[in-house]
Image (spheres, helix red, strand yellow):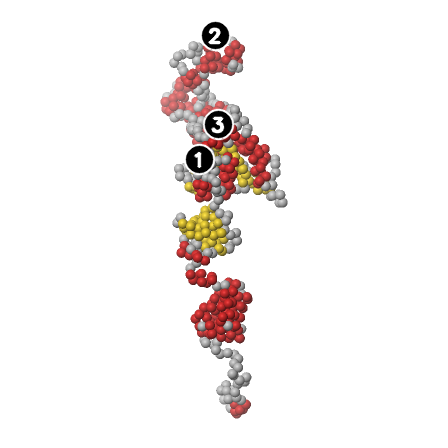
Amino acid sequence: MRKIKEILRLKYECLLSHSQISRSCKVAKGTISNYCKLAEARGLKWPIPNDLDDDAIYKLLFDHNGDDGEYLKPDFATIHQELKRKGVTLQLLWEEYSNNLLLPTAGAAEERDKDLKFKLEKESTHLNDESIQTKDCIQIKAITSKVYSYARYCHLYRKWAKKLKTSMRQQHQAGEKLFVDYSGKTMSIYNPDTGEAKEAEIFVAAFGASSFTYAEASYSQSSASWIASHISALEYFGGAPAIIVPDNLRSATTIACRYDPELNRSYAAFAEHYNLSIVPARSYKPKDKAIVENSVLIVQRWILARLRNLKFFSLDELNQEIKKLLEALNHKQLKNFNTTRHELFITLDKPLLQALPSTEFCYAEWQIKRAGLDYHVEVQKHYYSVPYVLAQEQVEVRFTHKVVEIIYRGKRVASHIKSDVIRGVTTDNTHMPKAHQKYKEWSAIKLLNWADTIGISTKIVITNHLENKNHEAGFKVCLGINVLAKHYGDLRVERACCKAISIGAVGYRNIKSILDKNIENQLAVNEEEPSSLPENHANLRGAKYYANLANVTIH
């Protein structure tokens, strides 16, 4: 406004030409001509009245939606709501506005009618108030009113929309906040043998004060990859900030909440190890982490765009190229600043970072499981035991690549070496009831040694079951025979096994039946018995018996 007032002073008070004014004010002659015409059209004369300040002059010259009210002003509030509907565009709304002036316009209907009445009276049209409310009158207004061009229509709407919501400028303290996110744009890594492509995610981290940036590629956004990228970033920076601001992805939060989000258990353990806080941004509020959003865009344009024509065959190969371009990015001169991101980082953020812990962070995952009736919990398709008193109880499982820990009510109740055997079972004998412990104490060698103390027949039966059946089934039969020995005695079991061998039925039920019926003493062959039966045996019938039957008459 100061320059416009100077142009008007030189023209009307000093009576200079537009060329002279242009040289004096460093303004193009065409611009000077436009300002003078605009001032004349708006009735602004020199000298400017004292009651007109710069704001009033600006409104008089520029804050007009049409010339002398000849333009029909759109209802921007309605336009704003219509644009929220799927498929609705400014082009469509402008066409409806220009072709059908019955659409809502700015202000209440009463104000529109007053404006219409004034226009009609100006044209010497005599209508009463009731007739003004009719459609015909509004159509007359359509004839007497102008419509904005599409460009002007869009400009006025966007100018109006800017006033709806303002953004608070965030002031970031040095070394305080590190903003992290994934790029969204991926890079392809090809299998050198099959040529199959796998997409790699791009992790980006940036400091709030210096915008010093880190980026790396990983195969997924899993919790393990997410935390591994954080660790790499902190090692690259050489220290840890006070706060990390992530998005609300599942690797960061399990429950997204504006005021009290619940962090992923592994992510919370990482924060505790590095003595920092995690403050997730609000959901669908990218302005909360505008620094990293801008850094993501820069990484996409400065790094990923330069790698678009290269073909990578490993993650390490891609990360090496990213690291080279990352160094160039951080040492690149910033526009409007006589410095680089790296220099700002060294000056602002680096001195205030926390030292990294001396011990390496051990990544662990957490799961909530329920122990089965067999007092085992399943972790990655392998079963681990817990104390039998916790059967069917809910427990927490913490596992790393080496160890599986089971926690109940904050207390560790079991710890096992992690196994990769699918459907395998890892059992601690101390977790078993006493009866189960005794059952498990038996082994094939122990059963054979026991059978050897009973007798040769028992050992033959035990050996037969251990060798000719599957291990579990044969083992159970042998344990059953052991129980029979405790109930009937070793001697009777040995005789029963001998009898079972002689008749070819050595199953558990066969031996038990022999013992129940006391058959084991009835040996098939006895050295004291004669090789043939006596002639006077009650069951023998000789020739005389059958000769007498020949004289019997059958009636």
The nearer-to-camera label among 1 and 3 is 1
| Depth order, front residue of 109/80 | 80
User: Which residue is tagged 1?
Assistant: 242
Label 1 residue SS: loop
Kindly identify the residue that appears in the image at 44 percent across and 10 percent down: 46
Amino acid carrying mark 3 in the image: Trp
Q: Position of residue 189 (x, y in %)?
A: 58, 40
Ranked by sequence position, the earlier of labels 3 and 2 is 2
Amino acid carrying mark 2 in the image: Cys
Ranked by sequence position, the earlier of labels 2 and 1 is 2
Q: Position of residue 422 (x, y in %)?
A: 52, 53
User: Which residue is tagged 2?
Assistant: 14
Residue 38 seen by the camera: yes
Label 2 residue SS: loop
Kindly identify the residue that appears in the image at 43 percent across and 26 percent down: 163
Give the CA separation, mark 1 to mark 3.
51 Å
Kindly identify the residue that appears in the image at 51 percent across and 83 percent down: 528
Number of residues whose C-alpha sits closer than 10 Å to that of mark 1, classed few (under 14), some (14–19) or many (20 or more): some
Residue 68 seen by the camera: no
Kindly identify the residue that appears in the image at 57 percent across and 33 percent down: 325
Check the picture and name the quadrant holding the N terminus: top left
Q: Quadrant of residue 45?
A: top left
